[in-house]
């Protein structure tokens, strides 16, 4: 939402200027669908070995708990691809991690792997979270590869920054819908899904701040479920092929233009733990079948229909939480409840279900506006029976999970979207518990019935809620909110700076439904 506000400001500053644009009736790409898993390749061997252990109807799942693992396993899957790669991301920044992953994708395409990539059109406006940069030409270069096709979700018809800002004002109802999905499927056998976008802060490579985030790696039927989600978006009327932008590029242009970027990557200090070129992952892949948790899965998604995004995720989450008999563990970066959800929690705690919830504090937040609308719900949540925790920006897990050596960020924020129900079922996905995820963006997430995976994720959540990682938020005898971490007790919500407290007040004036 911060980007939408910047575009509005740009429109007011620059005026309603004309610029290059797509036609009113956006061109459609040819229909395309994932091929069934093909024989041969490292991932076929992994799936065969896994099914010998757990059978063909279950999938294997492994948590990607650290940011280093999140990047490492994406590289491993891309390097291991023999037939196809499908990628679907909200943002893909033009930074070290983004360029490293794109290099490996291009290398896979060079060896004959067919690549399909869906990006939310936000990725064509920004270099990273704070620096505007028009990137249509860069995407057209990659799209020029004969084995790569890129499509943009909910594309602005105007392609220059001023025009996009003006269009945001004129078509806010449509432009406001963004694709928040995160998905990587390789050879229709392996998938990574969860909270991580493609950018340094999601992989522990940012010197300013890094996220505590989470993905799950799945092998087996879950990959085919993920391919089905990808194909629904790929063939929807909400996407437009990059070729429709009319930017002439060739494969030779791609090789020439990307040569300096590759040289720069080779000397990037933050990438010290990651090789520039394709690696042999056979040893890690051979261990994988024995390390994964068996489980059955159901992948939920909002759907892009002709004129609307149909939001199925809120109901899936309500039913999952409502089915709890003993315990609900929630870690979610951005929480803005409503009366109905608080009533549901109160009814469940009244019958003995325990709720423990971890979210961002103002001090760990990258989006203070969310805190502005969450903070009024602290007391109702606690009174409803929630054991409430908020992340510390100096959490002890930062060097273990958030930062990837040699990088050490100034602070850590929370970006996880996960739940554990009765230590038997797990939800991991892209969905925040706020109005934007429920009503505006497209979201997705997997529900896995796997006691083993649930126990591992519950242990991670218990650790993240410990006093060296989070404040416990309670009410004192007078009903006033207190933040406690060990011997430290605060009567005012923790913040990194006075300016954060000012932002926290200012954003209270903005509608909660924007976040």
Image (cartoon, helix red, strand yellow):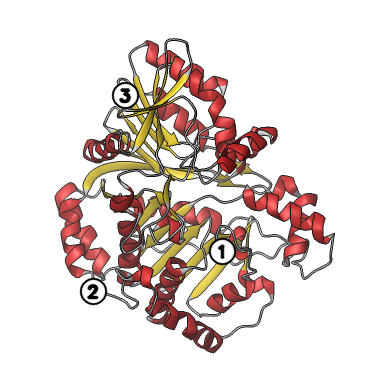
Q: Residue 102 versus residue 97: which sits nearer the camera?
A: 97
Q: How crowded is mark 1: few (under 14 residues within 10 Å), some or many (20 or more)?
A: few
First in residue order: circle 1 vs circle 2: 1
How many marks overall? 3
Q: Residue 51 versus residue 111: which sits nearer the camera?
A: 111
- The residue indicated by pointer 3 is 327
Q: How crowded is mark 2: few (under 14 residues within 10 Å), some or many (20 or more)?
A: few
Q: Is mark 1 on a helix, strand or loop?
A: loop
* Mark pair 1, 2: CA separation: 34 Å
Determine which quarter of the picture holds residue 393: top left
Q: Do the residues labelled 3 and 1 touch (CB within 8 Å)?
A: no
Q: Do the residues labelled 3 and 2 touch (CB within 8 Å)?
A: no
In the picture, measured across the screen, residue 22 lies left or right of residue 491, that is right
**Residue at the image position 49 percent from the left and 24 percent from the top:** 378
**Residue at the image position 71 percent from the left and 62 percent from the top:** 26
- The residue indicated by pointer 1 is 31
State the image coordinates of residue 512 (x, y, percent, origin top left): 64, 33
Q: What element carries label 3?
A: strand
Q: Residue 14 versus residue 454: which sits nearer the camera?
A: 14
């Amino acid at each position: 939402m911060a980007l939408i506000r910047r575009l509005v400001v740009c429109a007011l500053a620059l005026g309603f200027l004309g610029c290059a644009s797509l036609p009113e009736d956006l061109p459609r790409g040819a229909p395309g669908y994932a091929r069934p898993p093909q024989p041969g390749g490292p991932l076929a061997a992994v799936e065969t070995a896994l099914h010998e252990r757990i059978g063909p109807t279950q999938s294997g799942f492994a948590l990607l708990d650290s940011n280093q693992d999140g990047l490492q396993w994406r590289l491993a899957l891309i390097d291991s691809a023999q037939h196809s790669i499908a990628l679907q991301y909200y943002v893909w920044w033009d930074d070290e991690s983004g360029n490293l992953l794109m290099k490996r994708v291009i290398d896979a395409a060079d060896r004959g792997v067919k690549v399909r990539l869906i990006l939310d059109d936000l990725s064509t406006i920004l270099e990273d979270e704070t620096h505007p940069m028009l990137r249509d030409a860069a995407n057209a270069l990659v799209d020029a590869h004969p084995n790569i096709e890129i499509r943009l979700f909910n594309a602005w018809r105007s392609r220059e920054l001023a025009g996009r800002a003006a269009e945001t004002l004129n078509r806010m109802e449509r432009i406001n819908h963004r694709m928040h999905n995160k998905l990587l499927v390789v050879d229709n056998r392996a998938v990574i899904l969860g909270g991580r976008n493609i950018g340094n802060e999601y992989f522990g490579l940012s010197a300013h701040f890094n996220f505590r985030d989470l993905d799950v790696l799945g092998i087996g039927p879950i990959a085919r479920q993920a391919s089905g989600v990808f194909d629904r978006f790929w063939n929807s009327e909400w996407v437009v092929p990059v070729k429709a932008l009319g930017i002439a590029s060739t494969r030779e242009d791609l090789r020439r233009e990307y040569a300096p970027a590759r040289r720069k990557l080779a000397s990037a200090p933050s990438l010290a733990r990651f090789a520039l070129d394709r690696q042999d992952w056979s040893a890690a892949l051979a261990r994988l079948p024995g390390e994964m948790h068996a489980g059955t899965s159901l992948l939920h998604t909002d759907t892009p229909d002709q004129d609307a995004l149909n939001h199925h995720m809120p109901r899936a989450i309500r039913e999952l939480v409502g089915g709890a008999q003993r315990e609900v563990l929630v870690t979610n970066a951005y929480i803005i409840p409503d009366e109905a959800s608080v009533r549901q929690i109160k009814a469940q705690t009244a019958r003995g279900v325990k709720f423990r919830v971890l979210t961002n504090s103002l001090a760990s937040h990258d989006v203070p506006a969310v805190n502005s609308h969450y903070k009024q719900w602290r007391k109702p949540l606690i009174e409803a029976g929630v054991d409430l925790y908020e992340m510390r920006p100096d959490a002890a897990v930062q060097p273990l999970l958030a930062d990837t050596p040699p990088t050490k960020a100034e602070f850590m924020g929370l970006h996880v979207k996960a739940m554990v129900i009765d230590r038997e079922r797990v939800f991991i996905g892209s969905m925040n518990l706020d109005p934007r995820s429920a009503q505006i963006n497209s979201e997705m997430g997997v529900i896995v019935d796997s006691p083993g995976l649930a126990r591992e994720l519950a242990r991670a959540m218990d650790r993240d809620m410990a006093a060296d990682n989070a404040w416990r938020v309670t009410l004192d005898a007078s009903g006033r909110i207190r933040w406690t971490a060990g011997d430290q007790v605060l009567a005012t919500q923790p913040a990194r700076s006075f300016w954060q407290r000012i932002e926290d007040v200012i954003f209270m004036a903005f509608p909660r439904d924007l976040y």
